[in-house]
Image: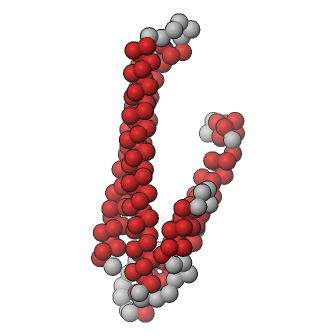
Amino acid sequence: MLDNSKRGSRTLFWMKFVLASMIVEVALLSLIYVMYGQALQATDPISAETGLSFLVLVILCSLCVGLSLVVEWLYWLFWLYRAEKNLRTMASTRFSPILAIICSCLPWIGQLFHYFVLKDMVNVQQGILQSRGLRFVEVPAKMMDGWLAMMIAAAVISFWGESHASTLFI
């Protein structure tokens, strides 16, 4: 279990890193827009140097965030595989390690499968700890259900359409 804790902490580190890098990218892109926005919106043609520097900065920011997303995703998948595999040595779970990975990698609905995989892992692990008489902090069902609601909301918003999403926050 200690090995899973280390893997989980690495995964959480990369999730935090991705969030921080996205915040930095939004700040940089906002700064770039403020610096070059007038030149880009003007009817006068912009200089090749201004346009090229704008393009290079946007591409570099996007590459950095994309690379950190890939690293975080790989750590997540490796952690999920090892956690399922280690848990199956003590009890049976609904998902095999490979099935958990495949379900997590499905486009659009993979995020929803995370809920079912993790809920099964939580229930099995809590059952094992309880049967052995070990103390543990129980994961509230409201937290898991709230996470499912957030995943569904994210999926709905992503398919909503640009015209509806822009009026959603006004």
Asked if residue 123 lies left or right of residue 67, the reply is right
Horizontal arrangement in the rendering, residue 131 relative to residue 164 (left or right): left
Q: Is residue 145 visible?
A: yes
Give the x, y percent position of residue 162.
Answer: 66, 37
At x 40% / y 56%, what residue is drawn? 72
At horizontal 53% and vertical 10% (from top left) the residue drawn is 42
Residue at position x 51%, y 78% in the image = 96
Q: Is residue 115 visible?
A: no
Residue 27 at x, y percent in the picture = 41, 33
> What is the tally of numbered marks visible in this picture?
0
Image quarter in which the C terminus is found:
top right
- What residue is at 45 percent from the left and 18 percent from the top? 51
Looking at this view, name the residue that lies furthest to the top.
44
Quadrant assignment, res 41: top right
Could you say which quadrant of the image residue 131 lies in?
bottom left
> Would you place residue 10 above or below residue 24 in this image?
below
Q: Which quadrant would the N terminus be assigned to in this image?
A: bottom left
| Residue 60 to residue 80: above or below | above
Residue 14 locus on image (x, y percent) = 36, 55
Q: Is residue 38 above or below residue 163?
A: above
The coloring applied to the image is secondary structure
Which is nearer the eye, 37 or 126? 37
Position in image of residue 74 (x %, y %): 41, 59
